[in-house]
Every structure is written in C-alpha cells, then in structure tokens.
Amino acid sequence: MNSADLRYPQQTLVADYLRAAAGVVLCGAPILLLDVNRWLAAFLLAGFALFALFLVRTALRHRTRFVLGPDTLCADGPVGTLVEWNRLDRLKLSYFSTKRDRSDGWMQLSVGSTGGRLIKVDSSLEGFHDIVERAAEAAKATGAPLSDATRANLRSMGIVVVGQEEL
Amino acid sequence: MLQFIVRRVLLMIPTLFVISALVYFIIDLPPGDCVTSQIEELLARGDPDAHARAAELRDLYGLNHPLWQRYLEWVGGIFRWDFGLSCQDTVPVADLISERMMLTIIMETSTIAFIWIVSFVIGVYAATHQYRLGDYVASFIGFIGLSIPNFLLALVLLYVGKVYFGLSIGGLMDPEYIDQPLSWGKVVSVMEHLIIPVIVIGMSGTAGMIRRLRANLLDELQKQYVVTGRAKGLPPMRLLVKYPLRHAINPFVADIGGLLPDVISGSVIVSVVLSLPTTGPMLLSALKTQDVNLAATFLLFVAVLTVIGMLISDLALAALDPRIRFGSSEK
C-alpha cells in the first residue's frame, strides 16, 4: 500500500471560515458597538470565544495535510501527531447532524495509538473512507474496544469489525 | 463535536431573531393598541380630555412610530436590558419582570428537576417490575396525570389543602416576606410554597415521561443481547445500567428541549389559579391589553429557554449516542 496525501477540500474550509467569521461578528459586534448589559455580555463573550476557537481550528485544518500510510496515519501541520496502526488503542466514529431527522450529517473519526494524541478527521476529508477502513482493520488486529455507536456507524459505511463485542 | 456546537449555535441566532420579529408583529396585529382600552375607560367616565390623553400616551409609548421602528428600538434595547415601557403601569418592563422572572425560573427549574427525578425512578421501576403491583400503581398515576388538566388539579389541591389541612397554598411565599429583602426565612417560605405548584405543573410531564421511559426500557429489555448478557451471568444491575438503560434514555434526553416550553405554557393557567407571582398571569394580562413590549419580552424569554433547552438536548444526545440513523444519509 502506498502513502496517500489527504487534505480538506477548499469548499469545506471556505464554508467553515464563513461560519466562524459570522459567529465572531454576530457575537463580537454588539460588545464593541453597544452598551451591553453585563450578563448578556458574558453570554456574547462565551459565543465569541467559541467561534474564535472554531476559526483557529479551521486555520489549523487548512495548514494540515494527512498522510495515510500502511503503518501510520500522520497529521502533518502546526499541531501534528502520528498514529501507529499496530499500536492503535482508541477508535471512535461519531455521526453528527443539525437536523431533527438527523439527515445530511457528517462523520467524525477519532483515532489514537498508545501514549499518543488523538487525530480527529471529518468525513469531508478526501479519502476519509480509506482512513476509516484502515483504522477498522487496525482495531480488529489490536483488539481496541469499539462502542455500540462506532460499530453501528462502521456498519453504515459497509465496514464490519468481527470479534469486537463489548459484552 | 466543536463543529456540531458551532453549527447549532449559529442556527440559534437567526432563529431567535425570526421568533422575536414574529412575536412582536403578531401581538400588534389585532385592531387597536394598548391605549385603546384605557381611553375607552376614560370616555366611559365622561372625561373630556380623553382624546388628548390618548395622544399623550401614544406619544409616550412610541405608538405613533411605525411598527418596524418600534421593533428595532425594542430589539436594540434588549442588549442594554431595556425592553421599553409597559403600557399597564407606565414603568420599564425590565423593572416589572425582574423579580417575577427570578421566581419563574426557580419554579420551572424545580418542576423540571421533579419531572426528571420522579419519572426516571418510577419509569425504571415500572419497566423492571412489569405486571407487578408497583407497575400497575405507576401506570395508574401515569394515566391520572395525563388525563387531569393541571388547573383542575390545582383547584382540587387548593380546596383539599385549605379545608382538610388548613394550609394556605396560594402564592409563592408567606405574606410577611413579600417585597422584603432576601433572607433565610424567605428562602424556606418559597421552598415550602413550591411543593404544590411543582407537583401540579409537573404532573402531566412526569406521567408522559414515565410511560415513555417504561416503553423504551421494556423494548430494550426484550432484546437478544440482554438475554445473552443474563445467560453469561452479568449481575442484573450492571446489565440494566450498562446497556438497556443507556439506549432507553435517549428519547428521554431528546425530550428535554420540548419539556421547557411545555412546562412554561402549562404553568400560566396554574399560576393564575394558585395566585403565583410568576410571569404567567402578567403575560396573560399583557396579551389581553396588547402590551406589546411586555408580552413580546416574556415570549422572547420563553423562546430563548426553548432554544437553549433544544441545544442542551441535542448536545446531550450527540454525546450519548452519536450514531447514524436509518434513513439519514452521510455527506
């Protein structure tokens, strides 16, 4: 298996930058321009901090490339880290949606190897399916525990990890 | 998760703006305004200056300005905690609602805590003791709670409390503490007076939650993995808490968002019946007199609480069970 260089598509990054900017402006502008009540100001500041954090995270994603190799998954960027597949001990695949019927959502994969930091990637990343497939293989080999939700989400992607029952 | 929180919070902001506009414009839709009824009263008394007084009041409340301008002034004032003047007493809305809002928040929070705690305990008990005496009693209480309107229950308890126990149930504190600064005695008095309203307002919500939790848990308890766990010798409590309860609790958590508006709207009539100094009776009177600033402020608070409740419920669900649903599609 050759290494693959994976990045978030420009379109996803632009959408996230716009969301962060909209939030920063909507929460920050009243604090700067109006005489805001202190309790409301606390709420707005919390919102401002949340969107500022999201802006930083988006910028980090923008400057990070993921290298999927036969033995490792490497996040090469300002806060880079490495996951070794043969030492994988954490795998979580979550599904999020903002709609009431939970449609049009996105997946998030968190993987980590012994002693290392987690790598989190969203399904908008190019080659996301390949990473999940490789992570599932590694989880099967190392016996990393998988939650019910993770197994259900893996199944929905056509990936079944046998011998991973929690009981 | 950060992405999820950001998207949900970002959706909340326009939602609240749209709700505030709808509320403000709809309250103003009926013909006339809040001055109309006051002037009719003056005219009935034969006051010759009634029309001059009407013009004066309309000027004071800004009713001469177009609706959109009044709305923008009201929205702009929210950031300064200034909700304009109330037509009922010609005092700032912020002064009128402050104490009542605090008592309402205390009452609604206690009601929601009551609903969760009582329905969780009874719901789990009823499901794990199906078709036993406890289950029948819980089901009976559930049906009673669902079928009796809150205000009727309030009237019955008011009568029973007064006639048989000599208790004064109305109000949220003893008369000697009204308009007094906060003290330990006042806190104790409020807590004593909270018991009946909390039971009355929380009754139907509790009953609904008990039935839902019981049904969900029974579904889970009959699944194959529970039988397997039992066959493997897992202790009953561990088997219950670790798997079926975790799954059964999801719809329970999803209901948090809907609970807040239900409790608030349910408490309006009960507050009138029990003479509770909460926002309910004031909202009712504000709607009747077309006091747009006051009514819109109350309804905006309800909307904010609902939206926050929905956010909490969605975040809790996303943390508890982040799994894809059948029929939903991954991007």
Image (cartoon, grey):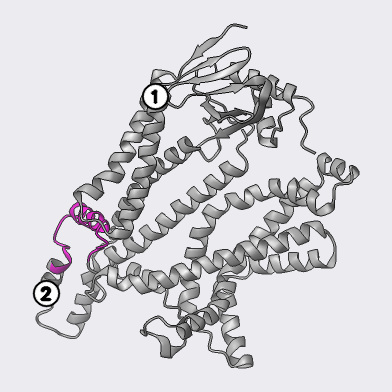
Q: Quadrant of residue B137?
A: bottom right
Q: Quadrant of residue A128?
A: top right
Q: Tag 1, which secondary structure? A: helix
Give the residue at the far top of this rendering. Answer: A2
Residue B295 falls left or right of residue B259:
left
Q: Which residues are magenta?
A: B60-84
The answer to which of B189 and B151 lies nearer the viewer is B189
Q: Is residue B221 above or below residue A87?
A: below
Q: Quadrant of residue B162?
A: bottom right
Q: Where does label 2 land, which residue?
A: B51
Q: Position of residue B273 (x, y in %)?
A: 49, 79
Residue B233 falls left or right of residue B208:
right
Q: At x 70% / y 25%, what residue is drawn?
A: A139
Q: Tag 2, which secondary structure? A: helix
Q: Where does label 1 land, which residue?
A: A13
Q: Are marks 2 and 1 in contact (CB under 8 Å)?
A: no
Q: What is the three-letter code of the residue carrying label 2?
A: His
The answer to which of B244 and B16 lies nearer the viewer is B244
Q: Position of residue B212 (x, y in %)?
A: 68, 54
Does the rendering let one see residue B175?
Answer: yes
